[in-house]
Image (spheres, rainbow, N blue to C red):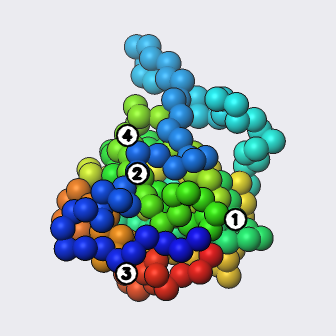
Amino acid sequence: MAHVGKAQQDNSDLDSRLVSSLDGCQLIDNHNFFDERGTFRKILPLEHGITSSHFSVSQINLSHNRIVGTVRGLHYQVEPFAESKLVSCISGSVFDVLLDLRPKSPTYGKFACYRLTPASGSLLISPLVAHGFQTLEEDTVLLYIHTNDYSPADSKGINPLDAELRIPWTLPISKISDSDRDLPSLSEVVV
């Protein structure tokens, strides 16, 4: 399926690219337990009809981001290492972006945005949906649970500054890696 045409100078194209959700991706409530000692948060096992056979853990990663306005992404892996991810904000908060790269999806080339905090729940991300975020607070920590191993040869990305996408980053971008800044635009990628 062809992606949506190039962005216009007004916000009409942003409205056509920004969707409220992507099929197979969802914000899942965590079970938080509070008492005088603090909080206990249950992230797995998943519920909402998602069983452990749909989500077998292959790796778990932490991303610590010291500076407000840091952008990471938009990252994904292709077959045979395509993966689902479960992303939870442990501390701080992020503006989270999911970009649909599934060729047969009705929302191919569109993105959905979420605000993740320790209280918001965890974001379940389907394979071939690129993920990126911008930190909204200092010392923001994200926990990633992946269903596949990291494979450098199969790890891909879309430039988070792609003018065609026009992602509405909520803050001025304070930090972005050269590798993310040099990623291809959506129009240059074939999944």
Real-space Cα separation, disc 3 to disc 2, in angstroms: 24 Å
Q: In the image, residue 126 lies at what x, y percent?
A: 62, 53
Q: Nearer the viewer, mark 2 or mark 1?
A: 2
Tag 1, which secondary structure? loop
Residue beneath the point at 29% across and 62% down:
14
Real-space Cα separation, disc 4 to disc 3, in angstroms: 25 Å
Q: Earlier in the sequence, mark 3 or mark 1?
A: 1
Q: Nearer the viewer, mark 4 or mark 2?
A: 2
Q: Which residue bears the numbered disc 2?
A: 19
Q: In the image, residue 107 lies at what x, y percent?
A: 51, 58
Q: Which residue bears the numbered disc 3?
A: 181
Q: Earlier in the sequence, mark 4 or mark 3?
A: 4
Q: Which residue bears the numbered disc 1?
A: 82
Tag 4, which secondary structure? loop
Real-space Cα separation, disc 2 to disc 1, in angstroms: 23 Å
Mark 4–mark 2 CB contact (< 8 Å): no
Of the residues shown, which amino acid type is indicated by label 1?
Ala
Q: Earlier in the sequence, mark 2 or mark 1?
A: 2
Real-space Cα separation, disc 4 to disc 1, in angstroms: 26 Å
Q: Which residue bears the numbered disc 4?
A: 117
Of the residues shown, which amino acid type is indicated by label 3?
Arg
